[in-house]
């Protein structure tokens, strides 16, 4: 029901936005024509173009969207500071929901001024919105969607600026095996595109060490049957593939029942919301993430600029979003003002970014991937080590 | 799909106790649905929000009183009682407001029941979204900075400071029975018995039963139907408040839309036990909670809701009036 009311509101907003954008569209086209000539002649930066963020700005996963929005914002602000024509920045709020993604993607595709998308943030919405972006030829660089299958769809427009779960999953498994020396592992997932995919890879990698598994439902709050299954399996380690809201509930209820094993989760849990939700129970949780720690010397300059602008340390995927936005901005600086040229530019891009060497293979996967382990110590998520 | 019976049988006691505890919470919420149905023959779909506001009252009271460290024994008890009372007060208040704003004007005009149902659904959205947008609502009056701890993170999970040491009380076989589960089950049953006795024995309770049985005759006999309806909402609200407090004790986390799923489940419990029947709500809640847990254990937790609703359909096929059947008025005179 809530959905219905919201979709009405969104539909109304979309119609309104569509009307205004249609009006803008004509002017953009004219402007675009001029710039093309200008770009061909002198290599001046393109005008009247925008980048877009696609992901949760509000909604239950808004906490994960914020650093991405701000990371890209920082890149754009830095570009605009000494650019003749400012690059616009549209925020497309999907609330992280795959249901809303297609209509929002269509809306974004219809806005000709948008020539690059930072996002979609999550795997589920990427899957839903991907075909629409591919058809519109609108290049996307996700700073955070990690489901491996996304790259197999043959969408030329799809790119991501971080390693997928096929690299994160084995890294998590490796950490569980080598660093934690786990003998018996219980694997839980939340049946989401992201969580179930990750859990399957971990199960496959760990093989016989997995002594039990369960699937929970997103939105549930009572996990007593799962907790009983974990405690009676004598597992020394629990891996959960899913997002922070459920992770916090599961770990609280496990600790509440006296479970003392290690709780291992992936990047979807690397959020302050996890610490708020689980409080003391979060202590000792291991979080894997293909995201670079803010303390890493490579991101020091970015981190201080980010902190200066937003008054907080960069959150998860802020640096990746910054990199993604900068790829597009480099293209705009070279005078690219349309999606087709931008797509070619992104596909051929090969530069050192803040987080890694930014270069995509033909499926849109980054060629250079790092996975890091974090742990929760004294109520904070601190970097532990890079998983080699 | 593999059926995991060995796990089910070896953990039967623990699964049953945790299932009973959650079922007891369903039962307390179900009471609100069943009582309003008994008196007005309509489903108060906003009751889930009555519960949700109770969880926040318990949360805020605890946050305001606990402070930093873990308080001692007596103080903990005082905080718990305070949280319980504030949850009950908040839920009762919301229930009364609902009755006054969303129902009474319609009942007075003799509007069709369908209209009241829609009004309730509307009220439910308004209440849930008000809570989900509480940071902006307080922003209008400029209090959002002062109340940041309470109104921040408006659309995500808010968790309560852990105040009860969830220690093992006793063991059945090799299953541990823990403090919180015992508190939840005992408190729920005590409250249900109290309400049942109140409705059966007190003068006001007789008024409720009389109105449920035949509103016109009851009115002719001098029963003030507006007062009776108010009282029904009040009782339902108080019980939802108790449920909210127990829920926060057990789950410790709440959110603006937490009422939706629980409301649906509690309504299911009410129908399962026989809607309009107080004892039916208790039976329905406990059965639903336990069967859900058993089903999760055998089939996997992803089947939890499937098990719950298949159970409902099957029971209604064989007993269309629910397990205990009959309604408030026709029951035990």
Image: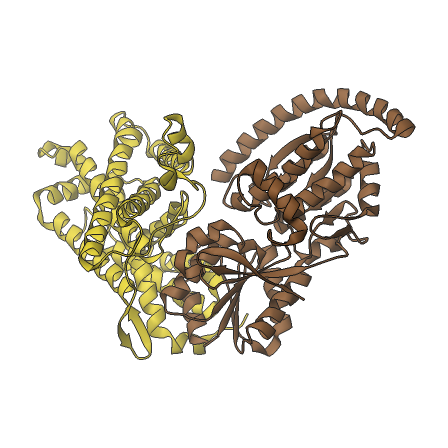
Chain colours: A brown, B yellow
Q: Is residue A76 left or right of residue A276?
A: right
Q: Is residue A153 visible?
A: yes
State the residue lying farthest toward the right: A41
**Viewer-proximal residue, B274 or A321?**
A321
Q: Residue at x 37, y 31 (%)?
A: B138
**Viewer-proximal residue, B92 or A375?**
A375
Q: Residue at x 67, y 43 (%)?
A: A322
- For residue B261, above or below residue A33: below
**Viewer-proximal residue, B202 or B70?**
B70
Viewport quadrant of the N terminus of chain B:
bottom right
Q: Residue at x 54, y 31 (%)?
A: A8
Q: Residue at x 49, y 50 (%)?
A: A272
Q: Is residue A120 visible?
A: no
Q: Is residue A100 left or right of residue B128?
A: right
- For residue A212, above or below residue A123: below
Q: Quadrant of residue A309?
A: top right
Q: Quadrant of residue A278?
A: bottom left
- For residue B168, above or below residue B289: below
**x, y percent for residue A59:** 51, 41
Q: How many marks?
A: 0
- For residue B38, above or below residue A253: above
Q: Is residue A127 left or right of residue A336?
A: left
Q: Is residue A243 left or right of residue B50?
A: right
**x, y percent for residue A365:** 75, 54
**x, y percent for residue B109:** 27, 25
**x, y percent for residue A164:** 68, 57
């Amino acid at each position: 029901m809530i959905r219905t009311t919201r979709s009405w509101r969104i539909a109304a907003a979309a119609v309104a936005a569509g009307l205004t954008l249609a009006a803008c569209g004509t002017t953009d086209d004219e402007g675009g024509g001029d710039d093309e000539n200008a770009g061909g002649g002198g290599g001046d930066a393109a005008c009247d173009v925008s980048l877009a963020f696609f992901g949760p700005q509000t909604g239950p996963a808004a906490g994960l969207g914020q650093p991405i929005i701000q990371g890209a914002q920082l890149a754009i602000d830095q570009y605009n500071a000494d650019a003749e024509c400012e690059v616009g920045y549209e925020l497309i709020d999907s609330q992280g929901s795959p249901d809303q993604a297609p209509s929002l993607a269509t809306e974004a595709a219809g806005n000709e001024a948008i020539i690059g998308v930072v996002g979609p943030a999550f795997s589920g919405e990427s899957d839903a919105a991907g075909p629409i972006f591919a058809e519109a030829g609108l290049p996307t660089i996700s700073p955070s969607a990690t489901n491996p299958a996304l790259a197999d769809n043959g969408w030329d427009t799809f790119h991501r600026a971080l390693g997928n779960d096929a690299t994160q999953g084995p890294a998590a498994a490796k950490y569980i095996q080598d660093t934690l020396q786990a003998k018996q592992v219980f694997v839980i997932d939340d049946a989401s595109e992201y969580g179930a995919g990750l859990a399957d890879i971990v199960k496959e990698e760990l093989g016989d060490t997995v002594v039990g598994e369960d699937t929970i439902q997103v939105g549930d709050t009572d996990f007593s049957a799962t907790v009983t299954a974990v405690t009676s399996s004598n597992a020394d380690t629990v891996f959960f593939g899913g997002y922070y809201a459920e992770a916090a509930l599961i770990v609280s209820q496990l600790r509440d029942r006296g479970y003392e094993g290690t709780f291992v989760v992936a990047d979807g849990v690397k959020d302050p919301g996890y610490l708020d939700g689980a409080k003391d129970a979060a202590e000792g949780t291991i979080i894997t993430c293909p995201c670079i720690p803010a303390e890493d010397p490579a991101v020091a300059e970015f981190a201080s600029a980010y902190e200066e602008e937003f008054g907080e340390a960069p959150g998860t995927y802020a640096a990746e979003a910054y990199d993604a936005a900068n790829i597009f901005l480099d293209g705009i600086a070279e005078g690219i003002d349309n999606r087709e040229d931008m797509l070619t530019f992104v596909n051929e891009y090969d530069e050192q970014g803040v987080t890694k060497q930014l270069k995509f293979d033909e499926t849109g996967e980054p060629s250079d991937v790092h996975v890091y382990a974090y742990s929760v110590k004294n109520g904070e998520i601190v970097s532990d080590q890079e998983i080699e | 799909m593999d059926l995991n019976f060995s796990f089910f049988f070896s953990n039967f006691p623990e699964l049953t106790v945790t299932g009973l505890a959650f079922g007891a919470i369903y039962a307390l919420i179900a009471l609100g649905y069943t009582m309003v149905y008994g008196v007005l023959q309509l489903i108060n779909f906003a009751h889930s929000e009555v519960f949700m506001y109770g969880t926040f009252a318990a949360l805020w009271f605890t946050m305001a009183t606990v402070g930093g460290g873990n308080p001692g024994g007596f103080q903990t008890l005082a905080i718990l009682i305070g949280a319980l009372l504030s949850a009950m007060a908040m839920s009762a208040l919301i229930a009364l407001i609902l009755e006054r704003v969303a129902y009474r004007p319609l009942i007075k005009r003799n509007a069709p029941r369908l209209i009241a149902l829609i009004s309730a659904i509307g009220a439910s959205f308004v209440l849930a979204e008000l809570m989900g947008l509480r940071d902006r609502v307080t922003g209008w009056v400029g209090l959002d900075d002062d109340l940041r701890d309470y109104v921040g993170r408006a659309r995500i999970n808010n968790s309560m400071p852990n105040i009860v040491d969830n220690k093992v009380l006793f063991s059945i076989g090799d299953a541990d029975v823990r403090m919180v589960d015992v508190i939840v089950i005992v408190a729920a049953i005590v409250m249900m018995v109290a309400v049942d006795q109140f409705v059966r024995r007190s003068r006001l309770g007789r008024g409720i039963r009389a109105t449920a049985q035949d509103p016109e005759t009851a009115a002719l006999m001098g029963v003030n139907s507006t007062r009776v309806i108010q009282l029904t909402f009040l009782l339902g609200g108080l019980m939802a408040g108790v449920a909210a407090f127990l829920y926060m004790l057990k789950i410790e986390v709440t959110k603006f839309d937490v009422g939706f799923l629980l409301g649906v489940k509690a309504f299911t419990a009410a129908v399962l036990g026989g809607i309009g029947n107080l004892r039916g709500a208790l039976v329905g809640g406990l059965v639903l909670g336990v069967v859900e847990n058993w089903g999760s254990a055998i089939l996997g937790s992803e089947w939890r809701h499937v098990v719950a609703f298949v159970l409902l359909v099957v029971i209604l096929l064989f007993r269309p009036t629910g397990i205990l059947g009959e309604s408030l008025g026709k029951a035990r005179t």
